[in-house]
Image (tube, rainbow, N blue to C red):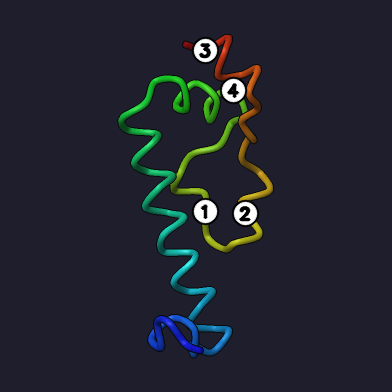
Amino acid sequence: MIWNKEYECMDRKSLEDLQLKRLKEVAHRVFERLLFYKRKFEESHVHPDDIKSLEDLRKFPFTRKSDLREGY
């Protein structure tokens, strides 16, 4: 059963393009609006504009529960 034909039937390239677009949007939003994430990005010497491919996600810091406890 297909719930959302537009997304579930996408070819791999289109799906990766959509994922990249959404990743860039989220990275920019958290960088601009949340000081916690802006600091994390700066500490890792990365900026949302550095995202050129899905592989670039590896450069960005992951957030652990302990990070959130310490940051808020």
Amino acid found under the numbered disc labelled 4: Glu
Of the pair 19 and 52, the residue shown nearer to us: 19
Residue assigned mark 1: 51
**SS label for mark 1:** loop
**SS label for mark 4:** helix
**SS label for mark 3:** helix
Residue assigned mark 3: 71
Is there CB contact under 8 Å for labels 1 and 4? no
Upstream in sequence: badge 4 or badge 2 = 4
**SS label for mark 2:** helix
Upstream in sequence: badge 4 or badge 3 = 4
Residue assigned mark 2: 56
Classify mark 4: residues with Cα within 10 Å, few (<14), some (14-19) or many (20+).
few
Cα separation, mark 1 vs mark 4, equals 16 Å
Upstream in sequence: badge 3 or badge 1 = 1
Amino acid found under the numbered disc labelled 1: Ile
The quarter of the displayed image where residue 67 is located = top right
